[in-house]
Amino acid sequence: MHDVLVIGGGVAGLQAAVFTAKAGLETVVLDDGNPLVSNTDKIQNLLTEERIAGDEIIKSGRERVMEFDGNIEKATVTRLDREDMPGPFTVTTESDDSYRSEAVIIATANEFDMLTPLDDEIEYVDGPEGEFTMEKHIQTDDANQASDNIYVAGLANTWEYQTAVAIGDGAKAAINLVSDRNEEAYIDHDW
């Protein structure tokens, strides 16, 4: 069983996975291979880059996850089940593979049909109308938590369609997950 499954391999999911893997949690990213940011060739709102292509950010993020012994699997998630409260969880993929974990970070901009088994505990909010928005988002608390051991980041959590926001949201979800698991504030300062 894994410590953390991250559903979604875009910038929010990869940033979350960097933090959880670096914190020593056995982390697996399940990625369908189609991060939205890959279609963007001129991201200009990051402090560290004047301009960078989305596929470069994804490549770099994947490398960082693997540097900290995280794994990335190409998989399309079709179902997320909770075996008991507060877990563990079982994720089923399109190819009928399954993964088990103690915690989940949902960082996908896809439909939420995979969450149907959790309908009694996950709430949704309507998304704003606009060209780059989703119909609904998963309701979370201030710690990006939707329910026990279910954290949410990126477009699944918020309507802000910016790479910098998604990266920060992924980091926040992961830090809160690690803090909850360790039962103390997780501190990973830049040195």
Image: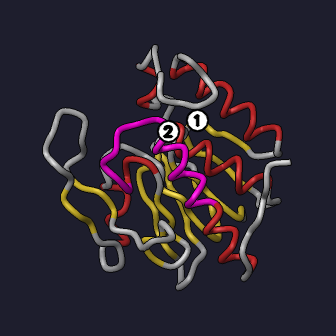
- The residue wearing badge 1 is 74
Indicate the position of residue 18 as horizontal and vertical percent values. 70, 47
Q: 42 and 96: which one is in front?
A: 42
Outermost residue to the right: 191
* Residue 139 inside the magenta-drawn segment: no
Indicate the position of residue 170 as horizontal and vertical percent values. 55, 51
> Which residue is rendered at x = 33% and y = 62% of the image?
138
Q: Quadrant of residue 172?
A: bottom right
Q: 72 and 172: which one is in front?
A: 172
Looking at the rendered image, the quarter that the N terminus falls into is bottom right
What stretch of residues is rendered in magenta? Answer: 157-174
Label 2 residue SS: helix
Indicate the position of residue 26 as horizontal and vertical percent values. 76, 58
Outermost residue to the bottom: 85
> Which residue is rendered at x = 74% and y = 31% of the image?
63
Indicate the position of residue 91 as horizontal and vertical percent values. 52, 58
> Which residue is rendered at x = 45% and y = 71% of the image?
142
Q: 135 and 117: which one is in front?
A: 135
Helix, strand or loop for the magenta stretch, by majority = helix
Q: Crowding near pointer 1: few (<14 within 10 Å), some, many (20+)?
A: some
- The residue wearing badge 2 is 164
Disc 2 residue type?
Answer: Ala
Q: Quadrant of residue 149?
A: bottom right
Q: Quadrant of residue 121?
A: bottom left
Label 1 residue SS: strand
